[in-house]
């Protein structure tokens, strides 16, 4: 039987979650940071908030995972 250290597994899962979140943030960050004309900064910020909400929920689910299988099912694809 393989014994999985859930604390370390969750650390790995959270790192993957943060990386996936950063990829989703990137196009919106560019609009906000560069103040690109013709792009709506308010819409970009609303999209960023939706991404924050999505990944906050995922973080809570990962923290609550009790088994490696539960944690693996939550891993971001990409």
Image (cartoon, rainbow, N blue to C red):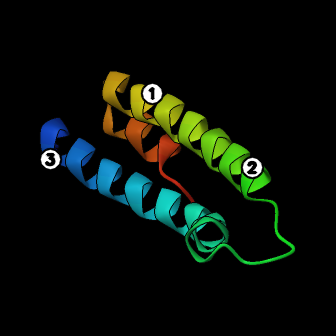
**63 in relation to 43, above or below:** above
Q: Position of residue 12 (x, y in %)?
A: 26, 55
Q: Visible in this render: residue 3?
A: no
Q: Visible in this render: residue 67?
A: yes
Query: Badges 3 and 2: C-beta atoms under 8 Å apart?
Result: no
Residue count near mark 3 (Cα–Cα under 10 Å), binned few <14, some 14–19, many ≥20: few
Left or right: 2 with respect to 62? left
The residue that mark 1 highlights is 61
Q: Quadrant of residue 33?
A: bottom right
Gap between marks 3 and 1 measured at Cα: 16 Å
Q: Position of residue 56 (x, y in %)?
A: 48, 33
Residue count near mark 1 (Cα–Cα under 10 Å), binned few <14, some 14–19, many ≥20: some
Mark 1 against mark 2, which lies toward the viewer? 2
Badge 3 or badge 2: first in the primary sequence: 3
Viewer-side residue, 2 vs 41: 41
Badge 3 or badge 1: first in the primary sequence: 3
Left or right: 62 with respect to 11? right
Q: Position of residue 72 (x, y in %)?
A: 43, 46
Gap between marks 1 and 2 measured at Cα: 29 Å
Quadrant of image for the N terminus: top left
The residue that mark 3 highlights is 8
Quadrant of image for the C terminus: bottom right
The residue that mark 2 highlights is 42
Q: Position of residue 50 (x, y in %)?
A: 67, 40
Query: Mark 3: which secondary structure?
Result: helix
């Amino acid at each position: 039987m393989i014994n999985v250290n859930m604390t370390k597994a969750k650390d790995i899962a959270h790192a993957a979650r943060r990386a996936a979140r950063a990829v989703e943030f990137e196009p919106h960050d560019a609009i906000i940071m560069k103040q690109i004309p013709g792009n709506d900064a308010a819409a970009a910020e609303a999209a960023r908030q939706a991404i924050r909400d999505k990944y906050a929920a995922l973080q809570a689910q990962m923290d609550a995972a009790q088994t490696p299988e539960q944690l693996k099912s939550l891993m971001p694809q990409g």
